[in-house]
Amino acid sequence: MKKQAIKATAFLLLLSATATAADIRPVISAMDMARSDNEEQALYVSYTVDLPAMSVPTNTEVILTPVVRFGGDSIELQPVILAGRSAYLAHQRNHNLPVGTDIVRAKGEALTRTAKLAWRPEMKQSVLTFRAETIGCRCKEEGAGSLPDMLAMDFTPKMFDLIIPSAQLTAMEQKVDEIVKTRSLSKKAYVNFKVNSTTLLPDYKTNPRELKAIMATIDSVRSDKDLSVETVLIHGYASPEGSYENNRRLAEGRTNSLKNYVDKNYGFGTKLHTASTAEDWTGLKEWVTASNLPNRQGLLEIIDSNLQPDAKDAQMKAKYPTEYATLLAQAYPTLRRTDYRIDYVVKTFTDPKTIAVLIETAPDKLSAEEVILLARSYDEGSTERISTMDKAADLFPDNQVAQLYGAFLALENKDLARAEKLLNRGGTSPVADYARGVLLHYKGENAEALPYLKKASAAGIEGAKEAQDVVESHLR
């Protein structure tokens, strides 16, 4: 049997008469309370009654009743009578002691007693004390008395001391040099064409400004030695006024004109792709929804209807002419646009010094694994290592490993709100089960924590079995 035990130093138990009687001073020593740490589930109590410092008068007896108090309840243990000579002999002759009562001569040997109590959850905080009753002495006051608390024990199990499964977290990571970091840069352009024309005129209206912005965006990627362009997508849109077929022709033709212009300047070849949308009804719906047009709801019903595009446009014009004029003047010009997107790949970084610079200047170039690599370059437990791991969690909310690293650091610091936030993005792996179990344990929700820890323990996650044992001890 294993016990959780704390030995008490000797305590002096004072059983005092009044000024007209001699003090009787029995000594209680070697007091101990221990909880069994196995399936037996018991509380063990032991103590020793030593010789009184002064003799007990011959006709006097002192009844000591050990009492274990816990959670507003108490249990009395077998009493012990320390009797003077005449009192002792009288009990021997009369056999009048209650069953289970010990009587000893006050001048006899020290008396050691133990007791075993069935464990109850309320016993996690227990106090051992003694009730004393002096009978037969010539005192002004005789009878029962409550003694001060003598031994207080707290058997509440300790909280789990977090073990971070570092090796298993590392095993979940992708290798830095196997990660392809694809990024995208998207913008809008409003290139102008003459009515019904698909020919791009670089100097027409605001085209110099619009084309310059497109080139600047492309150059920002092409000029960066850490980036390489994979594809460029140009997507042209037309507005709904006029016939659908003509709008389809315009959207497609104008998109191809811009494509040719870009390809002439950069020679992207097969990396350059196009798409076109004849009439941007989705964009129109968004514009009307955000507007304060008087008949906004009526317009939206037409836009959402199953009518063909030309019929929709005609009905809006006929039914709401004032609002339609506003659409022509304000909404439709914003729909005649070109969206363009540049997809590019960022090179891999393995030098911690380079990563340390990029995390401050261009964190979008990094992967979670590269930031974690930087964190590991710092000493275990250092402020730099911890703060860098935390940055990985904040920079890469979709990376489950980064979220788990951050969650374990938060659990270690007892920042339960942050740990819960990160674990919500931490996936469903056995390592995540372990972290969730520990989080629930720290929140005091041990019954809810146990299933997670059992699953993690069955999967062999480092620390999960120890956490499971601690949680089960809290539930006993």
Image: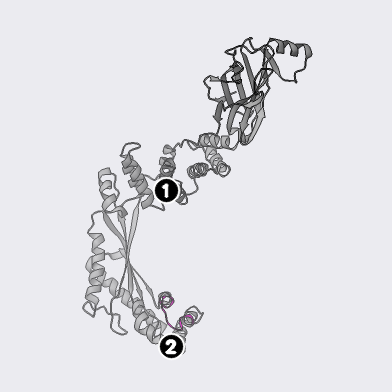
Residue farthest right in this picture: 94
Earlier sequence position, callout 1 versus callout 2:
2
The alpha-carbon separation of the residues under discs 1 and 2 comes to: 53 Å
Query: Can residue 351 be spotted in the picture?
Result: no
Q: Nearer the viewer, residue 454 or 58?
A: 58
Picture disc at residue 403: 1
Q: Is residue 262 above or below residue 345?
A: below
| Amino acid type of the residue tagged 1 in the rendering | Gln
Q: Is residue 369 above or below residue 283?
A: above
**Helix, strand, or loop for circle 1?**
helix
**Helix, strand, or loop for circle 2?**
helix
Q: Quadrant of residue 287?
A: bottom left
Q: Is residue 397 above or below residue 4?
A: below
Q: Is residue 289 magenta?
A: yes
Contact between marks 1 and 2 (CB within 8 A): the answer is no
Q: Is residue 14 left or right of residue 118?
A: left
**Which tag is nearer the camera, tag 1 or tag 2?**
1
Q: Pointer 2: what residue?
A: 317
Counting from the top left corner in percent of width and height, residue 394 is at 37, 51
Q: Residue at x 45, y 85 (%)?
A: 316
Counting from the top left corner in percent of width and height, residue 3 is at 57, 25
Q: Residue at x 22, y 76 (%)?
A: 202
Q: Nearer the viewer, residue 106 or 45?
A: 106
Report crowding for label 1: few under 14, some 14 to 19, many 20 or more residues within 10 A (C-alpha). many
Counting from the top left corner in percent of width and height, residue 456 is at 52, 40
